[in-house]
Every structure is written in structure tokens, then in C-alpha cells.
Image (cartoon, grey):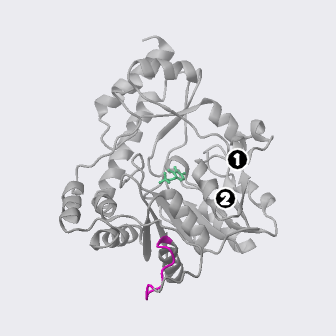
């Protein structure tokens, strides 16, 4: 069904079309040509990081990051309970085992509970900046140094949060803060890791194209057409983040005294405007009937069939998944749109 107010809508009114047209007219439709590299350089520079390696999705970026760090069968990686399943799947794809840690009140990994999950097999921590809220990275990096662990940041929902881990991974899916339709990118300071990421992304080809492949790798390349869109998006990243900050402030103001709604802590960058709602299913039906799309919070990883663990009903992540939802959040959302949406929420709880 088509919503008047969809939960997400890409904003493509910069030079996206111009760059794609240029890429296609130049014959650059594979990963060759200038656009992928220009995007990698622009996004790395924006973040003040030395190297960017673009790829086909956020999930691919996470998988490449773990593989570049040498993580595989027999290893364990600390992953939050409250995240999108791709964080855990990337670990499973490498043959390693995700070990889950519950979330705190900001939905991010509860750093005070990481150490109890560390074993002699633990190799890395994957903090996820959920809905654009930065994890306590000082605490994560302290634990990583103390136990000699690597840190892979899942920044799929947090373009604009400065990376500090060994590798930070971003998604460029259509509903993310910036997009290429599909796509992803890894950022790292380490030139050897950057070289490994690029090698694993492109089937571990050797320079001489001898067709001898020394390791199991992937075709996770980004196309020039995706690179063209992504470059145009990076050029607008400051404006996009500023527009989203205003959207967050307007939702806060419009919802702060609505009974039945609990606002969530402020975000560092706004991906999706999340909140907790009494009688959530009835609210969703009410909004649905008024053309306003909503989405539920993630479910705990321990509730996923592939990772089922009977502890799941006791988790904070479960408690949040029971009454959390997010409202339409995209760069083009206007003040009038938000007035309509918050008005519909208020109407549900106050009858007018
Ligand atoms: C979107 C997302 C991913 C996966 O990114 P894709 O580009 O869809 O593969 C991974 N982790 C989190 C937290 C996400 O929100």
C-alpha cells in the first residue's frame, strides 16, 4: 500500500542525475572509471580518515571488515542484541560466532556488560550506533585495548559519527542517511587493511590477473553508477545532516507533552526518529489509516531463529522491541508533514 507519509524516501536533488548520466555516457557501468574512487576519497576526507573502500552493501562492508582482520572459524565477536540482523550475519558468514550483549537505555550495547562475555576466543567487538546514537566508544576502545581485541563499527545508521575503531562500516541502502540505492563503504586509517579490503572485495585477483586466487574472497564491488549517486550524496552530507537535525528538533517539540509517548535520548545524527508508545499496535493502525507509515524496533538477536536463546524474553532489547517504533524520517520531510504526523499521534492519545 502506498502511504502519503512513507517511513523513508530518498533525497536525490543534488548532482546525482548529472553524475550518473556522466558515468553511463562515459561507458563506466562496472566498477571501473573515476566515480567509485571519487566517492571513496570524498567520504574518507569528510570523516578525516585516510582510506575508504566502497562495496556492494553495508552487510558486505561488515563481512569484508571482519575478513580483513583475519576473523574466521573458531573466533567469537561481541555483537549487540539490539541491532539489524546483518550485524550478526556478517560474523556468521565468516565462520565465526556472534556473542550477544544486551542494550542499555539508549538502545546501544551496554558497555558495562561486554567484559563478562569475553572468552579466550573473542577477537573483536562490533559496536552499532543504533538510529544514529553514538556508542560509548571510549569505553569500547578501553576494553579492546585491555583484551587486545579489534573493533569493527557498524555505522550503517550513523553517517556523520566520526569513526574510531579499526574499521567503520556504512550502508548506502535507499533508506539510510545517504544512499546509492544499494551500497556500502569501509573506512580505515590502516593502509594494509585498506589493501586487504579491496583485495577481498574483488575476488582476491592478483595484479597480473593470473587467475590464481590465494584465498576465498567475494564479488562485493560497487558499480560506477552507484559511486556516482554516492558521490553526489557526500557532497550534500553537511546539508543532509543539518536538515535531519531540524527534523529531530521538530519531532521533539511536537511530541514532548503527548501522553502515552516516551521520547528517546537525543541522537548524534538522525537516522530514524524512534520513540516508545503505549498501545503501540492501536497507534500504528490509527496512523496507518491516516497514511502515516511506521516501523517496529529491531527484535533481539537471541529471538532470531538462527540465534535462538531462551534468555530473550528477559532482555532489555526485548522490552524495547515490544513498544518501540519509528516515524517517517527522511531528508525531504517538511514542517507541514511533521505537523500532520505529530497531530495524528496526539489525536490518538487525546482524542483531538
Ligand atoms: C542497514 C543496516 C545494515 C545492512 O546494510 P545493507 O546495506 O542493507 O546491507 C547493517 N547494520 C545495520 C545496523 C543497519 O541498519
Q: Secondary structure at mark 2?
A: helix
Q: State the separation of the CA atoms marked 2 and 1.
A: 10 Å
Residue in front for this viewpoint, 124 or 32: 32
Q: Mark 2 or mark 1: which comes first in sequence? A: 2
Label 1 packing within 10 angstroms: few (<14), some (14-19), many (20+) = few
- Quarter the C terminus occupies: top left
Residue 320 in which image quadrant? top right
**Seen from this angle, which residue lies furthest top?**
351
Q: Position of residue 339 (x, y in %)?
A: 34, 27
53 left or right, relative to 218: left
- Quarter the N terminus occupies: top left
**Seen from this angle, which residue lies furthest bottom?**
208
Question: Residue at coordinates 44% horizontally, 84% vertically from top-left?
Answer: 209
Residue 35 in which image quadrant? bottom left
Q: Position of residue 316 (x, y in %)?
A: 70, 40
Q: Position of residue 186 (x, y in %)?
A: 48, 67
Residue in front for this viewpoint, 307 or 149: 307
Magenta-drawn stretch, dominant element (helix, strand or loop):
loop
Badge 2 residue CB within 8 Å of ligand 1:
no
- The dot on residue 306 is 1
Looking at the image, residue 314 lies above or below residue 96: above
Contact, mark 2 vs mark 1 (Cβ under 8 Å): yes
Label 2 packing within 10 angstroms: few (<14), some (14-19), many (20+) = some
The residue where tag 2 is placed is: 92
Residue in front for this viewpoint, 91 or 204: 204
Looking at the image, residue 116 lies above or below residue 204: above
What's drawn in magenta, residue-wise?
201-209
331 drawn magenta: no
Q: Position of residue 41 (x, y in %)?
A: 35, 73
Amino acid at each position: 500500500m502506498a502511504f502519503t507519509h512513507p517511513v523513508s524516501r530518498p533525497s536525490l536533488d543534488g548532482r546525482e542525475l548529472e553524475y550518473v548520466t556522466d558515468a553511463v555516457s562515459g561507458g563506466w557501468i562496472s566498477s571501473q572509471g573515476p566515480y567509485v574512487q571519487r566517492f571513496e576519497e570524498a567520504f574518507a576526507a569528510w570523516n578525516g580518515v585516510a582510506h575508504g573502500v566502497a562495496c556492494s552493501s553495508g552487510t558486505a562492508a561488515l563481512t569484508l571488515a571482519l575478513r580483513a582482520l583475519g576473523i574466521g572459524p573458531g573466533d567469537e565477536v561481541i555483537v549487540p542484541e539490539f541491532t539489524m540482523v546483518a550485524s550478526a550475519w556478517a560474523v556468521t558468514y565468516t565462520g565465526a560466532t556472534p556473542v550477544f550483549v544486551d542494550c542499555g537505555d539508549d538502545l546501544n550495547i551496554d558497555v558495562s556488560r561486554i567484559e563478562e562475555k569475553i572468552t579466550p576466543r573473542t577477537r573483536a567487538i562490533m559496536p552499532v550506533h543504533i538510529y544514529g546514537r553514538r556508542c560509548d566508544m571510549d569505553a569500547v576502545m578501553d576494553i579492546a585495548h585491555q583484551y587486545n581485541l579489534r573493533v569493527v563499527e557498524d555505522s550503517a545508521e550513523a553517517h556523520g559519527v566520526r569513526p574510531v575503531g579499526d574499521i567503520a562500516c556504512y550502508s548506502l541502502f535507499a533508506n539510510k542517511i545517504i544512499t546509492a540505492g544499494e551500497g556500502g563503504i569501509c573506512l580505515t586509517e590502516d593502509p594494509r587493511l585498506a589493501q586487504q579490503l579491496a583485495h577481498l572485495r574483488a575476488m582476491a585477483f592478483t595484479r597480473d590477473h593470473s587467475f590464481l586466487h590465494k584465498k576465498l574472497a567475494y564479488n562485493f564491488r560497487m558499480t560506477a553508477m552507484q559511486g556516482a549517486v554516492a558521490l553526489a550524496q557526500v557532497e550534500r552530507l553537511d546539508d543532509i545532516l543539518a536538515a535531519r537535525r531540524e527534523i529531530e528538533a521538530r519531532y521533539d517539540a511536537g511530541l514532548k507533552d503527548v501522553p502515552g509517548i516516551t521520547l528517546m535520548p537525543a541522537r548524534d545524527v538522525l537516522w530514524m526518529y524512534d520513540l516508545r508508545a503505549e498501545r503501540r499496535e492501536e497507534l500504528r493502525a490509527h496512523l496507518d489509516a491516516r497514511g502515516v507509515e511506521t516501523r517496529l524496533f529491531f527484535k533481539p538477536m537471541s529471538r532470531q531463529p538462527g540465534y535462538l536463546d531462551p534468555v530473550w524474553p528477559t532482555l532489555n532489547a526485548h522490552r524495547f522491541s515490544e513498544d518501540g517504533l519509528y516515524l517517517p524520517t527522511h531528508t525531504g520531510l517538511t514542517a507541514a508533514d511533521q505537523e500532520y504526523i505529530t497531530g495524528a499521534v496526539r489525536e490518538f492519545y487525546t482524542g483531538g
